[in-house]
Image (spheres, rainbow, N blue to C red):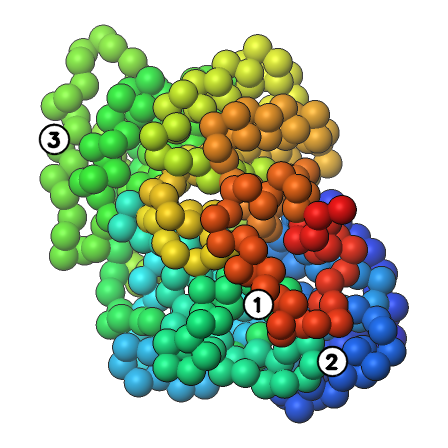
């Protein structure tokens, strides 16, 4: 297909590849990869373009799987979808089959392959990122070989393939662990950020999902909880804890009741840039305090948007930002079109002081040299990558800066 200019969701990343391809099936994916390998060009798979990092940027072929979408099969506790299936459509398809994913992220624009390849996550102490729900993938490697990877086949590759940055091959199918569909109550209320921080651990342990937005200009926080309709906590108890005349606080209000795929993701009318780092839970309090101090003292003039805090369970996926440790995330958002780099770089310096790992799909400035020490199984991933893509078909320059030390 004739090349067309690619622009990501926020508008901060744009480029024109040499070629743009939208294969209809796996055989065509194989032919395109073999052609690229023979000609010495690179291929980068792309999902919905929601990421703001340059993972997909290439001067070679940009390969979209939008035509390879839809639910393929389900057998009660597993479901398989084409890699290009958008999360919103996948949620509807699973719901119609009486099923649901365990947890979801804050938005549902992404494709299932793109979301899991970059470590997209929601919130909740008991839930890992979306990649932890991946039971298997089918991918076409850099040599054109088709591999099924699961606990039953090529199991040694699964910890690398569940979150791969598109570096191991073009994923064509994703198999997920699923469960019977269920409904959630979404509630929200505002409190002073000091109250929120004081009660955060208890909120996390008494709600299925909880996160909060801190608004720097008011020092208020919006607390958001999600609970199964058959497990709703008595939130009147929280009102009793407020000391009259103390920090601002309001009673929880019900926002929505519905199935998971409609209540967890939120529509985004305004577009934004974002940096997010995953921090060891033990480091969160000190890190957030420094973020708060710097935002108020250095960046309040330009930081017009909020700061989001979420939690992720530990996992054993090699390039996962929550590998081996319970994690709390801090994300700084900025309206598209407003300056962000000075603000984000300053926040990145704080996150790094506290052992943070950057979200793969959001703004950051780390390269392989800084990233390697953060991931105990980094070298194991590189061994698998070189085995499945020996000629670097998927290793465009931006990805190479992330994965290969100079």
The label nearer to you, 1 versus 2, is 1
Q: Which numbered disc flags the more N-terminal residue, 3 or 1?
A: 3
Q: Nearer the viewer, residue 159 or 117?
A: 159
Instruction: Tell me the tag on residue 78.
Output: none
Give the residue pinned by disc 3: 237
- Kindly report the distance in space between the C-alpha atoms of the residues bearing marks 1 and 2: 18 Å
Q: Which is more toward the observer, 153 or 29?
A: 153
Residue at label 2?
33
Judged from the image, the secondary structure of the residue bearing numbered disc 2 is helix
Disc 1 secondary structure class: helix
Do we see residue 130 in this rendering? no
Q: Is residue 274 above or below residue 136?
A: above
What numbered label is drawn on residue 384? Answer: 1
Residue 142 can be seen in this image: yes
Name the residue located 76 percent from the left edge and 46 percent from the top edge: 406
Please state the horizontal and vertical placement of residue 142, each as a whole percent of the image.
69, 76
Q: Disc 3 to disc 1, how far (Cα)?
A: 51 Å
Image quadrant assignment for residue 102: bottom left
Residue located 64% across and 78% down the image = 141
> Residue at position x 12%, y 23% from top?
240
């Amino acid at each position: 297909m004739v090349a067309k200019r690619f622009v990501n969701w926020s508008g901060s990343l744009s480029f024109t590849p040499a070629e743009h391809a939208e294969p209809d099936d796996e055989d065509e994916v194989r032919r395109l990869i073999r052609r690229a390998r023979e000609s010495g060009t690179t291929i980068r798979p792309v999902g919905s373009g929601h990421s703001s990092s340059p993972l997909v940027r290439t001067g070679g072929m940009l390969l979209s799987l939008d035509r390879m979408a839809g639910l393929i099969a389900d057998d009660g506790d597993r479901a398989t979808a084409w890699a290009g299936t958008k999360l919103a459509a996948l949620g509807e398809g699973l719901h119609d089959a009486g099923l649901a994913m365990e947890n979801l992220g804050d938005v549902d624009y992404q494709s299932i392959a793109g979301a899991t390849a970059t470590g997209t996550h929601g919130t909740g102490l008991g839930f890992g990122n979306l990649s932890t729900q991946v039971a298997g993938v089918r991918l076409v490697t850099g040599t054109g070989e088709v591999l099924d990877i699961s606990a039953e086949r090529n199991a040694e590759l699964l910890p690398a393939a569940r979150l791969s940055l598109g570096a191991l091959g073009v994923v064509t199918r994703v198999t997920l662990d699923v469960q019977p569909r269920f409904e959630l109550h979404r509630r929200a209320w505002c409190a002073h950020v000091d109250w929120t921080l004081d009660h955060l651990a208890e909120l996390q342990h008494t709600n299925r999902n909880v996160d909060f937005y801190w608004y720097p200009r008011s020092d208020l926080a919006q607390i958001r909880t999600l609970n199964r309709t058959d497990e709703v906590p008595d939130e009147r108890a929280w009102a009793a804890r407020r000391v009259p005349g103390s920090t601002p606080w309001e009673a929880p209000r019900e926002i929505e009741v519905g199935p998971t795929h409609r209540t967890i993701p939120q529509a985004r009318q305004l577009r934004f840039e974002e940096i997010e780092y995953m921090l060891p839970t033990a480091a969160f309090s000190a890190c957030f305090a420094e973020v708060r101090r710097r935002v108020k003292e250095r960046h309040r003039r330009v930081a017009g948007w909020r700061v989001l805090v979420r939690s992720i369970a530990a996992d054993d996926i090699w390039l996962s930002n929550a590998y081996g440790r319970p994690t709390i995330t801090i994300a700084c958002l900025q309206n598209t079109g407003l300056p962000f780099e000075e603000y984000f770089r300053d926040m990145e310096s704080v996150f790094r002081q506290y052992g943070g790992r950057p979200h793969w799909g959001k703004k950051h400035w780390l390269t392989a040299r800084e990233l390697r020490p953060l991931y105990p199984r980094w070298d194991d991933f590189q061994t698998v990558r070189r085995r499945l893509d020996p000629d670097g078909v998927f290793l465009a320059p931006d990805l190479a800066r992330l994965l290969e030390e100079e």
